[in-house]
Amino acid sequence: MTTVLIVDDEPQILRALQINLHAHGYTVVPAANGTAALLAAQTHPIDVVVLDLGLPDMDGLEVIAGLRGWSDVPIIVLSARHGSHDKVEALDAGADDYVTKPFGLDELLARLRAASRRAGTTTAEPLVETAEFTVDLANKKVTRAGEAVRMTPTEWSVLELLVRNPGRLVSQQQILSEVWGPAYAKETHYLRVYMAQLRRKLERDPANPVHLLTEAGMGYRFAP
Amino acid sequence: MTTVLIVDDEPQILRALQINLHAHGYTVVPAANGTAALLAAQTHPIDVVVLDLGLPDMDGLEVIAGLRGWSDVPIIVLSARHGSHDKVEALDAGADDYVTKPFGLDELLARLRAASRRAGTTTAEPLVETAEFTVDLANKKVTRAGEAVRMTPTEWSVLELLVRNPGRLVSQQQILSEVWGPAYAKETHYLRVYMAQLRRKLERDPANPVHLLTEAGMGYRFAP
DNA sequence: AGCGGACGTTAAGAACCCGTAAAAACACCC
DNA sequence: GGGTGTTTTTACGGGTTCTTAACGTCCGCT
């Protein structure tokens, strides 16, 4: 099952695409503006993005950049402009394909197939691996020695943040304010509890972690 | 390198932010009033704007409107008011984020990062290298001969400050007030202890440093 | 040479931070 | 409303880091 994120500010088009794509076997996640699109891309496992460049809240190119910051998901751009300049800009920004309005549904379906074929059914997903466990960011799944490891929502949020910044030191305040909210930036205590839980679930020797490292007084670091 | 336009009419705050943000790797363009801000935004390439609403010459909302007329640059608003009405007004006018005074530097830094991330301005932090060791500013990592070198928070703060000003002389007062706080500007003793530790960890011959140099009576200098 | 000031080195106690486990509070689902 | 799973508290032992102090060295000055 392929999931498509559709971003368009015109409700009729959004709805039309939603119905038609669903009829052709796609799961559809709709978004009416750039902010919602970026949010949806982080909360749903998306396989392809269909993006209208004319959005009310932010430039379409910014949406592309925002997605490309962490994901290699294929992006198909829709635009009313015929100019080749816009096309070049969008592709440079990281889009994979470009469709000019008006377009036929057949054309879009063909390009969707092409995009997901190019990406491979299970390849382009961000999958982070270590010697001990693997983290599937798209599907929010963690496996260890072939077995799926259950994560609570908070555990996943912390793990995801660390894994999305491999090798980088993530400060305690950053983790706390991203996971619990800015008001909790001082509750460093929570971190100790959850890091212990994560290590118990993921590390071979929880007392001597290899992948989830502590930098005393500064923060934590994920080592692939 | 990210360039931040700071707009505030209080000279102390302006200066404090200037120093602190510069120490954290931002290029700062200061402006003391709305007119100067709009002018500066047109003459410099700005990546993020930090705007105090209480300005002498014009309403902060007008500054937002003036910027939004031609630019999509992220705007972070500072305000002493806690009322949600002002907040809504500022965000409606086109601001991206809102910080209530008094605020911590950490919070502002986090919001700056978030703003530039949202805008897609991927701040590629530099990797500073010397013949003996390399400092990875983005990942807060120091390596020497392929091996990672552990740094304590204070050690890192001092090292980061020096490395961000390569070849430049950094005065003892500046280091002390940035790392320990303004109240410690006279405790030159701490510096001797920490410079010794840094040299022991990073210099081939700690007694004859090549990269972490002392300028007697003035301060310290990092030589790449 | 002797002296004073600034810097370097080292060590040790105090203060702070981290890991762990288990209990209490809470949320959610039937 | 009871039961399950999750989050938040609480407590404490053990480790790391910060601060302070004492002593050694270098250099310029008288």
Image: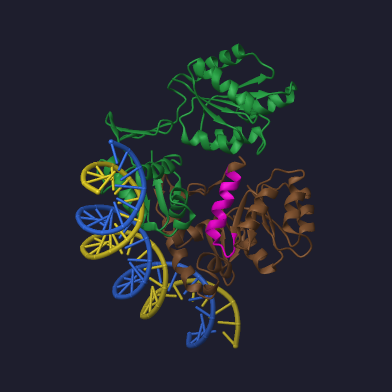
Chain colours: A green, B brown, C blue, D yellow
Report the magenta residues as a range. Answer: B100-117
Residue A32 seen in the current view = yes
On the image, the x and y values in percent for residue A75 come to 57, 25
Foreground pick, B163 / B137: B137
For the point 71% across and 23% down, which residue is it? Answer: A80
D11 on left or right of A26: left
On the image, the x and y values in percent for residue B2 come to 63, 48
For the point 64% across and 53% down, which residue is it? Answer: B88
Query: Which quadrant of the view contains residue A8?
Result: top right
Residue A209 seen in the current view = no
Identify the main secondary structure in magenta: helix
Query: Which quadrant of the view contains residue A147?
Result: top left
Foreground pick, A77 / A211: A77
For the point 78% across and 60% down, which residue is it? Answer: B58
Residue B97 vs B196, above or below: the answer is: above
B121 on left or right of A198: right
On the image, the x and y values in percent for residue B163 come to 55, 55
Residue B223 vs B191, above or below: the answer is: above
Foreground pick, B124 / A163: A163
On the image, the x and y values in percent for residue A25 come to 48, 16
Foreground pick, A148 / B199: A148
All told, the count of numbered labels is 0
Residue B175 vs A185, above or below: the answer is: below
B145 on left or right of B121: left
Is residue B89 rendered magenta in the image?
no
Residue A181 vs B207, above or below: the answer is: above
